[in-house]
Amino acid sequence: MKVANSSLSSPQQEFWRGARAEIPMVIGATPFGIIFGTLAADADLSLLGALGMSALVFAGSAQFIALGLLNNGASLGILFLTTGIVNLRHLLYSVSLLPHVKSLNQGWKSVLGFWLTDETFVVAIQRYQQPDHSPHKAWYHLGASLSLYVSWQLSTWVGLTVGNGIPALTDWGLEFAVVVTFIGMIMPYLQSWSMGTTVLVAGIVAFLANGIPHQLGLIVAALTGILAGLITDYWGSRLSIKKGTSIDA
Amino acid sequence: MPSLVWRDIFLVLGMALITFGIRTIPLLLSHRLELPQFLLKALNYVPPAILIAIIVPMVLIRQEGSHFSIDLASSQGRLMGTLVASLVAWKTQNLILTIGLGMVSFWLWQGLLKL
């Protein structure tokens, strides 16, 4: 990667670097798009509805859950409520991006918000947190977003059209690709005891809280993990201050 | 137009509006909000916390309809893939290699189980 003179890179360069950085995420998400399309073809949802969901909602887990609810004959009210709850984690992403998008105009913010997903957030936030002061980091974010968006549309379409022609596609375990992709994204964060604590606690709570409906266990787990990380960080800095003073004395 | 199409139009527009609102409203207000220091610190922990919370149930929990169960026998392949992916990610920091070797070891283990 050419990071050396990234502060000098043009919007266009940032855009394509973002699009390229998103490729591993695309690999993880594509099987999901294909499986979504395949399941949608058999679900109580029209072709227009399936394509429209990927194009306008663009939220993998909410789309899958909607299919399940539709097949159970759920009402629109339940579908909307569930969509809101399942997508609550995006609120955390949006707030995390807040300090980085302040200088952008409302049009830019709306565009980036529309495309805000798990997979674009993790790639974009890494770029924003790099120490260089490039004024074009949002272009990197945009490139990553578009790269995932285009692949999601294509994979949905592939699933809808040829998914049923591939034998037992949903039995291949392709969705496991998301797990290994996310493991690769988590690892670089594990540089401190507090981050390690966050991951450990969030993982355990996610397992224990899995029975809570509408994937709310996910939010509970993430918040508990974050709190545990903050506490570890607090005690860690207290300890090092104490050590520091004893050396001084 | 058949009523199913109308329902799907409402469905998609409703879901789209809700999702867009959640994703965008904090961003649109960002010029007015000044986040306190502790919150900024806490937000650093968001990505790994959410990512791990998404994948742990995917590895360990089996879902059939609305019934959840822990079935370590059926999790074996996923556990193997998780282990290999973690080792590769730790040693190489290479995302593509992590995905590739993780998937291959998952499929190999699943295949071995079927022999």
Image (spheres, helix red, strand yellow):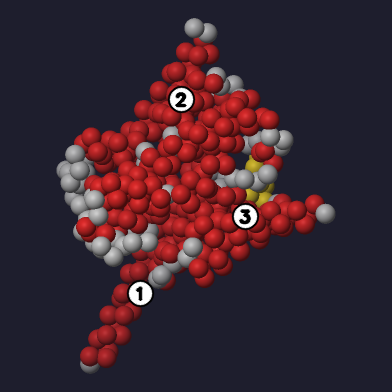
Point out which mark residue A52 bears: 2
The amino acid pointed to by label 3 is: Met
**Residue kind at label 2, given as amino acid type:** Gly
What is the chain identity of the residue bearing mark 1? A
Which residue is disc 3 drawn over?
A: B103
Q: CA distance from mark 3 to mark 1?
A: 37 Å
Q: Disc 3 vs disc 1: which is toward the camera?
A: 3
Q: Quadrant of the C terminus of chain B?
A: bottom right
The reply to whether the C-beta atoms of the residues labelled 3 and 2 are less than 8 Å apart is no
Q: Position of residue A104 (x, y in %)?
A: 20, 43
Q: Quadrant of residue A81?
A: top left
Q: Residue furthest top?
A: B1
Q: Secondary structure at mark 3?
A: helix
Label 1, secondary structure: give it. Answer: helix
At label 2, counting other C-alpha atoms closer than 10 Å, the crowd grade (few under 14, some 14-19, many 20 or more) is some
* Chain assignment, label 2: A
Q: Residue shown at 63%/32% (left/top)?
A: A163
Do the dots labelled 3 and 2 sit on one chain? Answer: no
Query: Which class describes the residues within 10 Å of circle 3: few (<14), some (14-19), or many (20+)?
Result: many
Residue that lies at the very extreme toward the right in this rendered image: B115
Q: Amino acid at mark 1?
A: Gly
Q: Nearer the viewer, residue B66 or A18?
A: A18
> What is the distance, in whole Å, between disc 1 and disc 2 at their CAs?
49 Å
Q: Can residue A223 be seen in the rendering of this structure?
A: no
Name the residue that disc number 1 marks: A236
**Quarter location, residue A226:** bottom left
The residue sitting at 51% across, 57% down in the picture is B96
Residue A94: give its label: none
Eye-nearest disc, 1 or 2 = 2
State if disc 1 and disc 3 touch (CB < 8 Å). no
Q: Where is residue A214? Give x, y as percent.
A: 51, 38
